[in-house]
Image: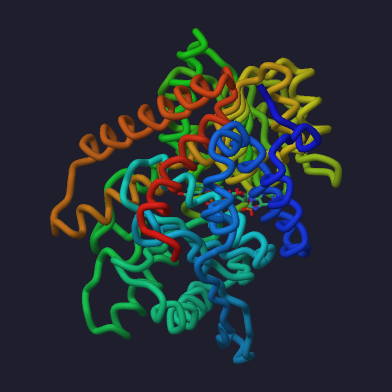
Amino acid sequence: MITCEKQIKSEYLKNILDMLEKKNSHEAEFIQAVKEVLISIEPVILKHEEEYKKLAVLERMIEPERIISFRVPWVDDNGNVQVNRGYRVQFNGSLGPYKGGLRFHPSVTQSIMKFLAFEQVFKNSLTCLPIGGGKGGSDFDPKGKSDFEIMKFCQSFMNELQKHIGHDIDVPAGDIGVGAREIGYLFGQYRKIKNSYEAGVLTGKGLEYGGSLVRKEATGYGLMYFMREMLKANNITVADKTVTISGSGNVAIYACEKAQEMGAKVVAMSDSSGCIYDAEGIKLDIIKEIKEERRGRIKEYINYVAGAKYFENNSNMPAIYNIKADVILPCATQNDINLSTAKILVNNGVIAIGEGANMPCTNEAVEYFIANKVLIAPGKAANAGGVATSALEMCQNSMRYFWSFNEVDKKLENIMINIFKQCESAADEYGCGCNYVAGANIAGFRKIVKAMKAQGII
Ligand code: NDP
């Protein structure tokens, strides 16, 4: 069962969507993310309409508890003063301290921050760990900056952010443009300002100073654990499937590693310039060297592998989506797959989509996939392995102890299996069949509403 916007029956929901558009008229991504969730949970809303209306559940659910926006001045290597804008959106803390990554990318706006923080609330709820939802970042572009410039930016960013975070308040981590290097500089500045070693204030830290084994691999591995469970529930195996992965950052690289370990053949990966195609299967050690060690461009792959091809993106569609595959893993950024791309993928016989990125498919693309019986592993559920392992990092920091790689990996696998089960049973309960997008939204929503109700009108 898929509800389209035109078919909404609940008057309460119609009014909320109307208000959402009026109040946030310049925030397209935020409106998109909220609509996807609210429309898909209409069966739950209809069941509790009067109560939700009386308690203004949806009004509270879509309004962030707090948005912090601040100036980030820093001095570049030429001695020029640069100014960026920083954000932290603390969306919903009813399940625990706000938790969610920091994104450094020139495309960052308040709308992007709010959509990511809103999605994070549901994702964190699905992990069943005690974490609320938040997100932050800056329109700073790390590309082409020296190490020294990155450090100075991170220090200036933390000078303000430190006023609003803490291991029981808000615990940021990485996202696009924020990896181990940036987390290190951010943590160093926090420690200097506070004169206190609060390891649990940031996650994604280096292993030498409080990081967790498997955190680096967690989002990509988790995505494939979820994909395996989803395919298994539909009598399909991962082994021997062809896979393409958009992106070649943290999530994409470790999704590739786990997919290969499970016996799939990954034939293409990309970055924002274009994609490489290797019919024999991607050699991941080469990708790691180009991307993790040298921070180079994916195009360089063809210099190492005879027979591999490179396709430049054109303005209509990322080149990678022209390549046929059974399983597509969008692991780059939001709105990568729109309706016309979805039609090409369905035409090419795609079986399943695994959203490693947050909101990589537009709402129209998701509806089209579901209508055409393509299985979708929704980002909120399928990429929750990263934040779940961040919560395990917080846990180890509190214990002043660490678990082995296998211990953390096993916990991650069990969390992802449990997340899939929640999506499956919520979808089943509300007659949504294999619509795991609705299943994830319903399962995440119910838990947050319970906690919000218990805590009163705040
Ligand atoms: P990275 O910065 O490590 O990698 C991002 C990748 O996506 C790069 O290959 C980058 O290419 C590509 N990319 C970024 N922006 C664009 C764009 N506008 N158009 C096309 N390609 C783009 O980020 P992550 O791997 O950490 O994050 C990827 C996605 O996964 C994001 O949506 C993030 O929110 C989501 N995610 C990440 C988690 C994590 O643990 N890291 C957890 C859950 C979700 P280029 O180098 O050319 O910019």
- Residue 137 against residue 301 in the figure, above or below: below
Can the viewer see residue 295? no
Q: Quadrant of residue 408?
A: top left
Image label count: 0
Q: From the viewer's perspective, tell me whether residue 455 is left or right of residue 153.
A: left
- Residue 262 against residue 156 in the figure, above or below: above
Q: Residue at x 63, y 68 (%)?
A: 141
Q: From the viewer's perspective, tell me whether residue 404 is left or right of residue 300.
A: left
Q: Residue at x 33, y 31 (%)?
A: 413
Q: Residue at x 54, y 39 (%)?
A: 48
Q: Nearer the viewer, residue 216 or 444?
A: 444
Q: Residue furthest top?
A: 235
Whole-percent x, y for residue 456 in the image: 40, 60
Q: Residue at x 55, y 27 (%)?
A: 436
Q: Nearer the viewer, residue 165 or 446?
A: 446
Whole-percent x, y for residue 211 in the image: 28, 56
